[in-house]
Structure formats: structure tokens, C-alpha cells
Image (cartoon, grey):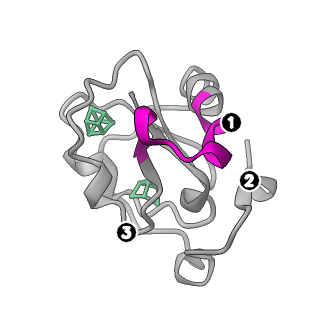
Amino acid sequence: AFVVTDNCIRCKYTDCVEVCPVDCFYEGPNFLVIHPDECIDCALCEPECPAGAIYSEDELPDEMQPFVELNAQLAEVWPNITEQKEPLAEAAQWDGVANKLQYLQH
Ligand code: SF4
Ligand code: F3S
């Protein structure tokens, strides 16, 4: 499956949801996740993310490994999102800031 990682937090551009053929993105207050059992590994979303936050699980950097479980867990509780919306207000300021996991809202 593909995995949404750290740099989505506090940005949430949502370009990714627009291209997903199986609508497997789920939305929290300041982060999106991919449901690993629904993702068909089409790779369409990866280049669409302006924040470069989406990786194939096979190519996930070591420091992003905790996001595998986080995507799986949160996809079970957050609502589905299928249409693009406005990014978060301070997306541009937060894009590229390291270690944003501490700001994740549930
Ligand atoms: Fe959706 Fe394809 Fe991205 Fe998986 S890889 S989340 S199926 S767009
Ligand atoms: Fe997040 Fe990138 Fe989608 S910032 S909402 S993974 S387009």
C-alpha cells in the first residue's frame, strides 16, 4: 500500500484524493491517511502531493516507518474524503518543516 507521511501534517493539500480510483483516503483535522487494505498500489497519488508526503510502503524512509501503523489505525476511525478541498490556512508555512508528528490532531 501507499502511505501518507509527516509532511502532510498541517498542510493537507488534498490533491491526492482527487486522483485515487478507489477513494481510499480518510481525513482527520490536519492530516490524511490511506487505508492499506483498500489501496490498489496504482501510484497515481504519489506525484500529485505538493508536499511529497506520499510513499510506497516499499520505498518508505526508515524514519517514516511509524506512519504505516498510523495510516492503518486512523483509516479505521476517520471519515472518507473523496473530493479536493482548500489546503489548511498555513499550509505553505508548514510545508517542509521537520517532525510534524507532534502536531497531529485526532
Ligand atoms: Fe489511491 Fe492509488 Fe494512491 Fe493507493 S496508490 S492511495 S489506490 S491513488
Ligand atoms: Fe496530504 Fe499531500 Fe494529500 S499534503 S492531503 S498527502 S496531497
- Which of discs 3 and 1 lies nearer the camera? The answer is 1
Looking at marks 3 and 1 on the same chain, the residue that comes earlier in the sequence is marked by 3
- Which of discs 1 and 2 lies nearer the camera? The answer is 1
Q: How many marks?
A: 3
State the residue at coordinates (39%, 40%).
81
Relative to 42, say whether 51 is above or below: below
User: Relative to 85, is 103 on the left or the right?
Assistant: right
Instruction: Name the main secondary structure of what is drawn in magenta.
Output: helix
Q: Which residues are magenta?
A: 55-68
User: Relative to 29, is 91 on the left or the right?
Assistant: left
Relative to 61, say whether 74 is above or below: above
Q: Which three-letter amino acid code belongs to the residue tagged 1?
A: Pro
Looking at marks 3 and 2 on the same chain, the residue that comes earlier in the sequence is marked by 3
CA gap between label 3 and label 1 equals 22 Å
Q: Is residue 62 magenta?
A: yes
* Label 3 within 8 A of ligand 2 by Cβ: yes
Q: Are marks 1 and 2 in contact (CB under 8 Å)?
A: yes
State the residue at coordinates (69%, 68%).
98
Relative to 69, say whether 19 is above or below: below
Question: Percent position (x, y) of residue 77?
Answer: 61, 24
Quarter-of-image position of residue 106: top right
Question: Percent position (x, y) of residue 88?
Answer: 54, 69
| Residue assigned mark 2 | 101
Residue 66's tag is: 1
Q: Ligand 2 appears in which quadrant? A: bottom left
Residue 50's tag is: 3
Q: Which three-letter amino acid code belongs to the residue tagged 3?
A: Pro
Question: Percent position (x, y) of residue 90?
Answer: 60, 79
**Is residue 52 among the parts visible in the rendering?**
yes
